[in-house]
Image (cartoon, grey):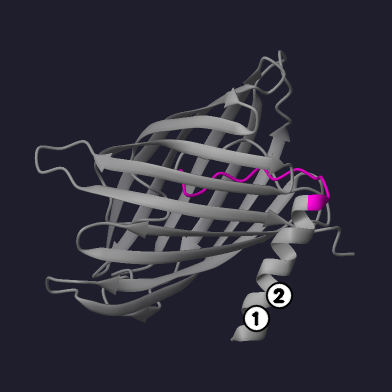
Amino acid sequence: MKHGFTAVVLMAFVCALTPHQAYAIRPFVTDDARVVGRHLGQIETWLVGSHYETIHNVLGAVGPTDWLEITTGFAHGGAFSGPGSGYSITGPLFQFKALAREAKSGAWPGVAFAAGVLPPIGEGALTPQGVGTFGYLMATQALLDDDLLLHVNVGVKTTDIKTQWLTTTTGGFGFQARAIGNWHAVGEIYHGDPYDPLLRTGASQIGFRYIPNERVQFDGTLGSTLAEDSEQWWTFGVRLVSDPLW
């Protein structure tokens, strides 16, 4: 475990010295119309915490081409109270993302499409009740030499629960705006989450993104559902992009 931790710290340090683009957007739900890049790999990991649970998410992505990104990942954690209390784990998630038009500052919006599946595999409360599938279209408008990014998503997700398919639309609007230096303000409002079959309401997040270079990003947010009995949470995430893998 000690050597593994040292390797992660060393990787983060090396990434911080060598520039390349890191475009993924989790822990935000509203995705951006960009992909990791040809022959590059990416790791995203983030914590989500509330008054009743803490969940750790991990996503790994690779770019076989300059327009295609393939992602897999899992989530695990524990609830502190309620019927789902205790440790749980679920995964793997599978997703592909195809870039149709690159986002360039001052030009037409970038466009991409993503689709994926969430198998009902795992232990505990995080395990999906049935097979989940999702697909969504995303557009990104880049302005002011990429100092302002606007993202729009629209899609649909389905879940097979006891042989009955439940279908829900998803959508979101998000932004990233440079505040000062490498610090950016980020925010979003969305309905549903392609990765979460249980979320069928509106929600919002606001926070920061620190980008020391184009290979490393740090994110932190505060979020809340948009309902009378609203629930609040916090997130903190890190993402790293590799050198070309082949």
**Residue 178 at x, y = what percent?**
59, 25
**Residue 220 at x, y = what percent?**
45, 45
Q: Is residue 153 left or right of residue 105?
A: left
Residue ID at (32%, 65%): 54
- Tell me the quarter of the image containing the N terminus: bottom right
Neighbours of disc 2 within 10 Å: few (<14), some (14-19), many (20+): few
Label 2, on which residue? 7
Q: Is residue 158 left or right of residue 42?
A: left
Say above or below: 123 vs 160.
below
Residue ID at (67%, 14%): 144
- Residue at far right of view: 246
Say if the magenta span includes residue 54: no
- SS assignment for the magenta stretch, majority: loop
**Residue 165 at x, y = what percent?**
29, 58
Say above or below: 56 vs 221.
below
Please give the label number shown on residue 209: none
**Magenta span covers which residues?**
17-28
Residues at circles 2 and 1 in contact by the CB criterion of under 8 Å: yes
Tell me how far mark 2 sits from mark 1, CA to CA: 5 Å
Which of 117/187 is in front? 187
Badge 2 element: helix
Say above or below: 105 vs 67.
above
Badge 1 element: helix
What residue type is disc 2 on? Ala
Which of 228/8 is in front? 8
Say if the magenta span includes residue 22: yes
Picture quadrant where residue 130 is located: bottom left
